[in-house]
Image (tube, rainbow, N blue to C red):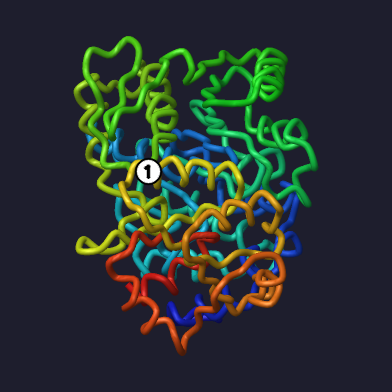
Amino acid sequence: MGNFGSIEAVWHYLDNIPMFSKVGAKAGNFSLDNIRMFCEAMGDPQQNFSSIHVAGTNGKGTTCFLLEGVYKQGGYKTGTFISPHLLRYNERFRINGKDAEDEDILRFFQTNESLLDKIPLSYFEISTALAFWLFAENEVDIAIIETGLGGRLDATNIIEPECSVITSIGMDHTDILGNTIEQICREKAGIIKRVTPIVYGDLPESCEQIILKTAESRNSKVYSAQALSPKWNEGKVQLAGFDFTFDTHLAEPINRWNIAMVAQVVKLLQAEFELPESTLKQGIESIQRVPGRFEKLRSDREWYFSGSHNLQALASLKEGLDLIKSQHRVVVFSIMRDKISDEVLTFFSSFDQRYYYEMDNDRAAGYDEISGYLEVQKMDEFNHSVILNELKASLVIFTGSFYFYPIVKQWS
């Protein structure tokens, strides 16, 4: 049995590896050498299935869910790799829309224990290798692979996808990816492979030029979501060239760009993965929710969770909130210390009531740090039930970090 006699042994092993959510950049290994070596020793499982590679500052997760829904609707067996997980590790790996089973995860660790001893991998690298192994084992037709951070040196960047997608570029992870939007864009453009088409969303002009030049240098064709002129009207999305609207269940207008990118991907992969327009429509409309992305927490209350943690995502969140008619808005937030900025705090200051919850996490900002910048009331394990009872008739948005999600789910 070795060290992995049970799934609990796997969780213990993973819990003892530094995670980005807890320690930030120190958890990363910004080189592809080890992941290449590990996957090669496994027989390069990532070469046994077709894939779509998705990078971007915001919108990656939603775009992955939409692509999964569309190809699953078309009868293809899908694999989807996303991060971070919100409640349990298994969420990172989806086979045909369902989370990976404990026994399959356990089998990976038992099968590859000697390799894990020989080749040191970070938490995300192990997860990436596990995703590739699972998708090969399950013989998926197409895998949707989300980058963890950046692109160029992201562990997922050893795949040779059918196409690459860059959803958006914004200021995030500047300590790792660069201090300007152009530097960040160059890192994300690192997923563009030779003679592999690239689809991109609504980007600043300077970033668009970087994408175009990178694609040209690699002889890759470029497809812009802007070419479809996406329009949003109360959850309905209209794309140029389509004689119907997509009636979505998504709440934020920004999703018109995600849907436009999915439509572009489907169009350019038609030769290998045929999908009629009716299936594209059905697949988009089949997505009832994307966990943690403006997710309604209870049917009887106007309570929502959004993992928005940078200025671009918060601007999108505001667009969604503005569509909900309410005179009184409450925010309950928890944020990582490295996400604090004047602009982010200004966003939170716009709410009628503000509560701050301090997470037990080395990276998380403390209540005293936030209250030094912004007038907030403290929410904690002792008073949250009383406060939430008072807020049951209010429009409440819980936000600031995906790592806040499991706490909020316990409350709601």
Q: x%, y% of residue 39?
A: 60, 50
Which element type, helix, strand or loop, lies under badge 1?
helix
Amino acid at the residue labelled 1: Phe
Answer with left or right where residue 162 lies relative to residue 277.
right
Instruction: Tell me if 271 is positioned left or right of 192 in this view.
Output: left
Q: Nearer the viewer, residue 105 or 280?
A: 280
Which residue corresponds to the image point at 34% horizontal and 27% vertical from the top-left?
232
Q: Which residue, given by chain and number where applicable, does mark 1 sit on?
A: 65
Instruction: Indicate whether 213 appears above or below 75.
Output: above
Tell me what residue is drawn at x 65 percent, y 13 percent. Answer: 219
Res 115 seen here = no
Q: Name the spot of residue 136 as percent of width and height, x first.
A: 43, 47
Q: Is residue 177 visible?
A: yes
Q: Quadrant of residue 367?
A: bottom right
Residue under the point 57% across and 34% down: 168
Q: Residue 111, position in %: x, y? A: 50, 66
